[in-house]
Image (cartoon, rainbow, N blue to C red):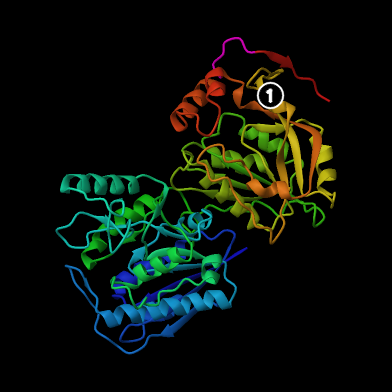
């Protein structure tokens, strides 16, 4: 379970603060243990903060220091130097709390943001030490919307070499390229960030701070924080998958309803977490502690294919299931609930798809599974199914205390009775990991590529492994229509063959592949 401290200095108009606090209540937190801390820097103690804390044991509120005028109007926010460093001191206090109390992450967030419900769980899954979710603001009414992240210096929005001299046209071109990049879903290295930032324990222990660097004349505590972090050897990242809504002016409250309709009302949701679908269907059978098997699976628009068959088979040997639905627009979710029957099920539906960036989904699924306190995590795709004897044998494998990773052979089925075997189709000759024991305290590391990143962290090879003779059927190639769809998907997502093998992509449509008869053991 990840411990996350959500922290914010608050000097805010009630109408704006109300929306900020509401969005905190909507955050998805599966696999996380959240605590909140606020510095109430309002002239009078905030009733909204007190109401947020009422009945919660994980909320702390501290009163701010000496009262100073801080003016926000329909033009801009008016900061004085003394205010900047007072806020910096508040943020350093939060850093000290996170350090002393053993939090895995500190999430520093401004109180004029309405957060997307997936913000925290997504940022924590990126594996970055310092990362901000990007939002866009008209810093002056006459300016176009601009991000709160930048490339270098005070707020430079373009790349340039140290001695490079640019004319105005080239400068505009590079600024446009940077802004266009940030408008695409992704995670990008930047030179400066702030306002909606997740900081890892590693960064905290290395000594990040908002304290003023005395010989640096840049304005704003975030700039001093970023420069100090870079000097410590830490990299800064901006993520653009789940932008928050920035209420920079009270007039911008008028646009909030549209944002909520897009991101909080995609499907029927529990009242407390509108973007999260978690369904516990029954207590389910419980195996002996230490040998429980948790199925973890990614799904997207799998109704009418192999999902029902796969889940009904898995329900015969697993104790629980964690399913991450990547914004399906068919009845995939209903198929999952029905097919698993009595199995204890945690099901989370993303509001927007991320299938073009597999690593994000794989890490999200892993974190969800780890959050259920599993013994074993068995990762199957929605078109993968064990041969029948696995129903009797998998539990015996899970009961072996001397093994932490089990590997199996995967057979690419070209129809119900035959699998493919030729130059680029040899997966069945090798064992690959499908079932991993969760080892608390182990520092899991991922292959950070958007496609073919692996279903498990890459360093599980350091754990004690064993190969099993149980076999897995890969059903996803059996229909010609499926093969054609996969061919075009790989060509679209990996056109240069950077993450896979181009020759294998091209061989998918081979009209006369070599097929071998499947026989049950």
The residue closer to the viewer here, 42 or 274, is 42
Instruction: Give the residue pinned by disc 1.
Output: 426
Q: Main secondary structure of the magenta part?
A: loop
Residue furthest toward the left?
Answer: 142
The residue located at (46%, 26%) in the rendering is: 491
Q: Is residue 154 left or right of residue 362?
A: left
Picture quadrant of residue 434: top right
Q: Is residue 436 left or right of residue 243?
A: right
Picture quadrant of residue 76: bottom left
The residue closer to the viewer here, 23 or 277, is 23
Residue count near mark 1 (Cα–Cα under 10 Å), binned few <14, some 14–19, many ≥20:
some
With respect to residue 272, does 325 lie above or below? Answer: above
Q: From this viewpoint, is residue 89 visible? A: yes
Q: Is residue 510 magenta?
A: yes
Q: Could you say where residue 465 lies in the image, as x and y percent from the top left?
A: 78, 45
The residue located at (60%, 46%) in the rendering is: 323
Q: From this viewpoint, is residue 294 visible? A: no
First to last magenta residue range: 508-513
Image quadrant where one finds the N terminus: bottom right
Total number of numbered discs in the rendering: 1
Q: Could you say where residue 267 lies in the image, as x and y percent from the top left?
A: 45, 48
With respect to residue 245, does 90 lie above or below? Answer: below
Circle 1: element type: loop
The residue located at (29%, 51%) in the rendering is: 160
Q: Could you say where residue 144 lies in the image, as x and y percent from the top left?
A: 20, 54
Q: Could you say where residue 260 lies in the image, as x and y percent from the top left?
A: 35, 55
With respect to residue 132, does 464 lie above or below? Answer: above
Residue furthest toward the front?
Answer: 163
The residue closer to the viewer here, 237 or 312, is 237
Q: Is residue 341 magenta?
A: no
């Amino acid at each position: 379970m990840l411990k996350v401290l959500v922290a914010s200095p608050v000097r805010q108009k009630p109408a704006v603060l109300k929306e900020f606090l509401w969005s905190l209540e909507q955050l998805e937190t599966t696999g996380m243990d959240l605590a909140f801390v606020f510095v109430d820097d309002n002239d009078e103690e905030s009733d909204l903060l007190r109401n947020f804390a009422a009945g919660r044991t994980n909320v702390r509120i501290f009163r701010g220091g000496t009262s100073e005028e801080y003016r926000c109007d329909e033009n801009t926010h008016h900061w004085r130097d003394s205010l900047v460093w007072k806020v910096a001191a508040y943020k350093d206090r939060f850093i000290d709390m996170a350090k002393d109390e053993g939090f895995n992450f500190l999430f520093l967030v401004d109180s004029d943001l309405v957060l997307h419900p997936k913000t925290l769980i997504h940022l924590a899954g990126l594996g970055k030490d310092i990362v901000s979710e990007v939002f866009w603001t008209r810093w002056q009414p006459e300016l176009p919307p601009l991000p709160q992240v930048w490339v270098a210096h005070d707020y430079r929005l373009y790349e340039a070499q140290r001695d490079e001299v640019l004319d105005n046209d080239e400068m505009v071109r590079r600024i446009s390229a940077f802004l266009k990049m940030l408008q695409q879903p992704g995670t990008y290295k930047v030179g400066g960030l702030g306002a909606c930032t997740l900081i890892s324990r590693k960064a905290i222990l290395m000594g990040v701070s908002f304290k003023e660097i005395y010989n640096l004349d840049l304005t704003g505590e975030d700039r001093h924080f970023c420069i100090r972090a870079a000097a410590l050897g830490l990299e800064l990242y901006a993520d653009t998958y789940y932008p928050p809504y920035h209420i920079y002016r009270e007039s911008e409250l008028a646009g909030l309803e549209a944002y909520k309709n897009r991101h909080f009302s995609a499907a029927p949701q529990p009242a407390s977490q509108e973007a999260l679908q978690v369904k516990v269907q029954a207590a389910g059978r419980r195996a002996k502690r230490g040998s429980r098997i948790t199925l973890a699976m990614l799904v997207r628009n799998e109704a009418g294919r192999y999902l029902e068959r796969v889940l009904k088979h898995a329900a015969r040997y697993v104790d629980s299931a964690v399913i991450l639905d990547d914004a399906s627009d068919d009845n995939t979710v209903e198929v999952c609930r029905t097919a698993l029957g009595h199995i204890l099920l945690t099901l989370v539906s993303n509001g927007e798809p991320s299938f073009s960036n597999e690593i994000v989904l794989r890490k999200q699924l892993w974190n969800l599974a780890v959050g259920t306190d599993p013994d074993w995590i068995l990762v199957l795709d929605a078109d993968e199914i064990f041969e029948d004897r696995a129903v009797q044998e998998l539990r015996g494998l899970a009961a072996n205390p001397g093994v932490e990773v089990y590997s199996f052979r995967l057979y690419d089925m070209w129809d119900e009775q035959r699998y493919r075997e030729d130059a680029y189709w040899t997966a069945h000759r090798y064992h690959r990991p499908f079932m991993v024991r969760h080892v608390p305290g182990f520092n899991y590391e991922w292959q950070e590529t958007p496609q073919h990143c692996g279903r498990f962290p890459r360093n599980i090879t350091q754990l004690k492994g064993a190969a099993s003779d149980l076999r897995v059927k890969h059903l996803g190639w059996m229909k010609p229509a499926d093969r054609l769809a996969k061919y075009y998907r790989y060509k679209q997502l990996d056109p240069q063959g950077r993450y896979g093998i181009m020759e294998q992509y091209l061989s998918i449509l081979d009209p006369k592949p070599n097929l071998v008869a499947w026989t049950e053991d």
